[in-house]
Image: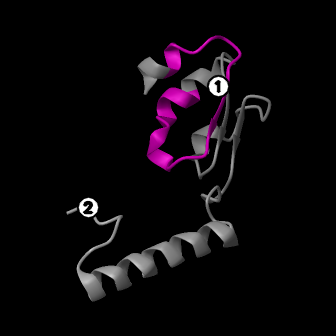
């Protein structure tokens, strides 16, 4: 949020490759508009960012950080294995409850 961004040193480069809400977009806009921070955001942002210099703000048009074939296959294989384990034995090392 705004408070966390304010703790960063002037000139910090922040890269958000997590989920969209991990970055407070209004607070990020204030920081990059003032040219205090530089931010790269893996996800869409509103039209209010249109006039911010790419020297201070960059964003992708879709979340892409985890959308590699390898990552998606790993997640799919893990979920499938866990589901089969639970169906067969009622147990799995990743089962929460």
Judging depth in this view, the residue of 87 and 41 nearest the camera is: 87
Q: Is residue 4 magenta?
A: no
Q: Quadrant of the N terminus?
A: top left
Q: Which quadrant holds the C terminus?
A: bottom left
Considering the numbered disc 1 on the image, is that residue within a helix, a strand or a loop?
helix
Residue wearing tag 1: 32
Foreground pick, 7 / 43: 7
What residue span does the magenta drawing correspond to? 5-29
Q: Position of residue 95 (x, y in %)?
A: 29, 66
The furthest residue to the right: 55
Residue at x 66% of width, y 21% of height: 37
- Provide residue 86's location: percent of width, then percent of height: 29, 80
19 inside magenta stretch:
yes
Q: Residue 36 appears in which quarter of the rendering? A: top right
- In this rendering, the answer to whether 11 lies above or below 49 is above
Q: Nearer the viewer, mark 1 or mark 2?
A: 2
Say whether residue 11 is left or right of residue 63.
right
Q: Relative to 80, is 40 above or below?
A: above
The extreme bottom residue here reads 88
Query: Alpha carbon of mark 1 to alpha carbon of mark 2: how far?
Result: 40 Å
CB under 8 Å between discs 1 and 2: no
Q: Is residue 8 above or below residue 20?
A: above
Q: If you read the primary sequence from the N terminus, does the residue marked by circle 1 or circle 2 appear first?
A: 1
- Kindly give the residue lying farthest to the left in the view shown: 97
Seen at 48% across and 73% down, the residue is 78
Q: x, y percentage for residue 65?
A: 64, 55
Residue hosting label 2? 96
Dividing the picture into quadrants, the one containing residue 16 is: top right
Q: Residue at x 68, y 66 (%)?
A: 68
* Camera-nearest residue between 65 and 23: 65
Q: Is residue 75 left or right of 95 when viewed as pictured?
A: right
């Amino acid at each position: 949020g705004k408070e966390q961004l304010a703790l960063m040193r002037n000139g910090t480069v922040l890269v958000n490759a997590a989920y969209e809400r991990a970055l407070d977009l209004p607070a990020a806009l204030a920081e990059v508009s003032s040219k205090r921070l530089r931010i790269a955001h893996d996800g869409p942002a509103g039209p209010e960012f249109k006039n911010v210099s790419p020297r201070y703000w960059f964003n992708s048009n879709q979340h892409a950080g985890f959308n590699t074939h390898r990552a998606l296959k790993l997640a799919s294989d893990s979920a499938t294995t866990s589901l089969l384990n639970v169906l067969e034995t009622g147990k799995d090392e990743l089962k929460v409850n």
